[in-house]
Image (spheres, helix red, strand yellow):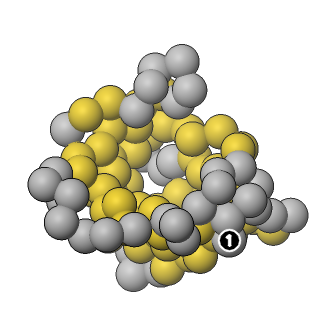
Amino acid sequence: MGEIREEWSQKIYWKNLDPAGLIERLTVRLVKVEPGGEFPLHRDPYSHLFYIVKGSCEAHLGEDVYRLKSGHIAFVKAGEIHGYINNAEENTFLLSMNIHED
């Protein structure tokens, strides 16, 4: 798994599930978030869909905070502030789907 920029986040690793780039306007990554791993609040110019495969995390979506668990899905609109942290004692695995409009 690759590591998300260390200066940006810690204890988060990912693997691109379409390395050949065959899916247009969609980036799909399997993300591993170790206990204590955090992706700090930020905004992106594209939308996201997060699917929690295993484990749980605290997700900040806009002004709201949610406890996401295995099987939960979260949608983030382009430009919306968001981030997440794994404050559990086990690894969390999620699918991160970045939807590029153009």
The residue labelled by disc 1 is 77
Q: Where residue 49 sits in the image (x, y, percent)?
A: 49, 72
- Would you say 99 lies left or right of 17 here? right
Give the farthest residue toward the right: 63
Residue at the spot 56% in from the left edge and 26% down from the top edge: 8
72 with respect to 92 (left or right): right
Residue sitting nearer the eye, 45 or 42: 45
Q: Is residue 27 left or right of residue 66?
A: left
Residue 25: image location, x then y, percent: 40, 68
**Residue at image point 33% right, 51% down:** 31
> Quick check: can you spot residue 64?
yes
Does residue 28 lie above or below 5 as drawn? below
Q: Position of residue 94 (x, y in %)?
A: 36, 62
In the rendered image, the residue lying farthest to the front is 102
Who is closer to the viewer here, 73 or 102? 102
Q: Is residue 15 above or below residue 75?
A: above
Residue extending furthest left? 20
Q: Position of residue 32 (x, y in %)?
A: 32, 47
Image mark count: 1
Q: Is residue 17 visible?
A: no
The quadrant holding residue 93 is bottom left
Q: Is residue 91 above or below residue 95?
A: above
Using residue 60 as the reference point, say whether residue 31 is left or right of it: left
Q: Residues within 10 Å of mark 1 (few under 14, many from 20)?
A: some
- Mark 1: which secondary structure? loop
Which residue sits at x=59%, y=61%? 46
Classify the position of the N terminus by image quarter.
top left
- Picture residue at 30% right of the left edge, 44% below the top: 14
For badge 1, the amino acid type reads Lys
